[in-house]
Image: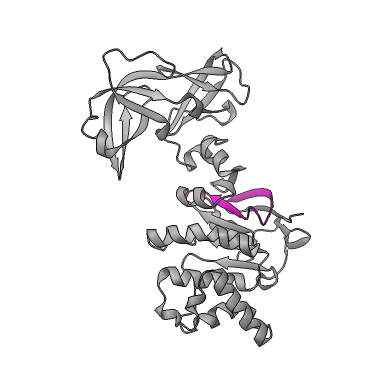
Amino acid sequence: MAESLSVRIRHEVLDVDLSLPLEVDTPITVVFGPSGAGKTTLLRCIAGLAHPGDDAHIALGAQVWQQGQSTVPVRRRGIGYLFQDHALFPHLSVEANVAYGIAKLPQSLREQRVRTALENARAGHLLGRDTASLSGGEAQRVALARALASAPKLLLLDEPFSALDAPTRDQLRGELREILVATGTPALLVTHDRAEAWALADRVISLVDGGVQQIGSVEEVFNRPATVPAARAVGVENILRGEITERVGGNVEVRVGDLVLLTGNPEGLEVGESVALCVRAENVSLMSDAPTPTPAPNRFTARVTEIRERGSLHQIRVATNPVITAYALGSGSHSILQAGSLVTVDVVIERCHIIASAHAPTETS
């Protein structure tokens, strides 16, 4: 049976009480949230690098690391820690850096651990190299090997790829899960990068303003946020305040401003309840308006008010009440969709998500 990480911290920005099973076959729990949410503070408290307050409780299975003022030192927690900037010692060789945390092992075992850790981190080719000569990606591989060399019970990763260039970052993300599964190492990884969370997470903790908003799969947290702060944190572009006006089979109609949108009702909410309706911009399609568009649920006409380039995509806002944001491919849409253009707007019914009144915003956002 998998051990669980139990954390109760009420200190500074953090107000957290959670229990996480740490399974080796689904190893990565991502702590996701905006800057200032308390993500790094949470990791530092778990590691023992920051004091979590007098009422804190932190334990891994039966091992209690923090109970009030009683604390287990960092070196005895069996934790590996990978920082943003790799934190290698430039005056030491690659081997010496990897061996730094296992200096008390017999030399033969220590040397074997170093070789194995470098191979596991896909960095065996770096044996014998000077640390100062490493590229950013190579240095982060060595830092990962150092973290793995002590066979940690839990690996903590604080924005581990944020300082790397995009191609290197993508490559290391793709390999990290394979490495952690192969070594049987559960990990808690902090990021504010949505692409990183999607690429890596088996489970996501949504952390906003020091509080846990939601814990679930990446699909649940990003596509079915439990609260409005969670929806904002994961970047839902359309969060619309409204009221359920009618049941339509298994769906409900929600009036948001001048619009009536059809959506599913997984929470069994009642007519008359206030809700927040969430729709990602990629689930809103725009078409150059035909003279008489075929009537359909969640289809209406509106004028384009703003177009913002976002690389290969354009972010497009249309003059509905409330304003709706959509995405369209830049190459073909820019010549067709101009500010002032009349368009047909389709909102995908199956991708509308409603949040109950207790978590709805106080105004349309």
**Is 155 or 240 nearer to us in this picture?**
155
Residue 266 can be seen in this image? yes
Q: Residue furthest right?
A: 62
**Is 184 or 281 nearer to us in this picture?**
184
In what quadrant of the picture does the N terminus appear? bottom right
In what quadrant of the picture does the C terminus appear? top left
How has the structure been colored for display? one colour
Question: In the image, is 3 to the left or to the right of 98?
Answer: right
* Location of residue 219 (image quadrant): top right
Residue 190 in magenta? Answer: no
Is the residue 161 above or below the residue 26 in the image? below
The segment highlighted magenta reads 12-38
Question: In the image, is 287 to the left or to the right of 244?
Answer: left
- Residue at (39%, 23%) from the top-left corner? 346
Residue 193 can be seen in this image? no
> Residue 142: x and y, percent?
51, 73
- Residue at (31%, 33%) from the top-left corner? 316
- Residue at (58%, 80%) from the top-left corner? 100
> Residue 116: x and y, percent?
60, 75
Q: Residue furthest bottom?
A: 107
Q: How many marks?
A: 0
Is the residue 278 above or below the residue 313 in the image? above
Residue 28 in magenta? Answer: yes
Is the residue 62 above or below the residue 318 in the image? below
> Residue 155: x and y, percent?
61, 63
**Is 359 or 263 nearer to us in this picture?**
263
Is the residue 292 above or below the residue 179 in the image? above
> Residue 311: x and y, percent?
30, 45
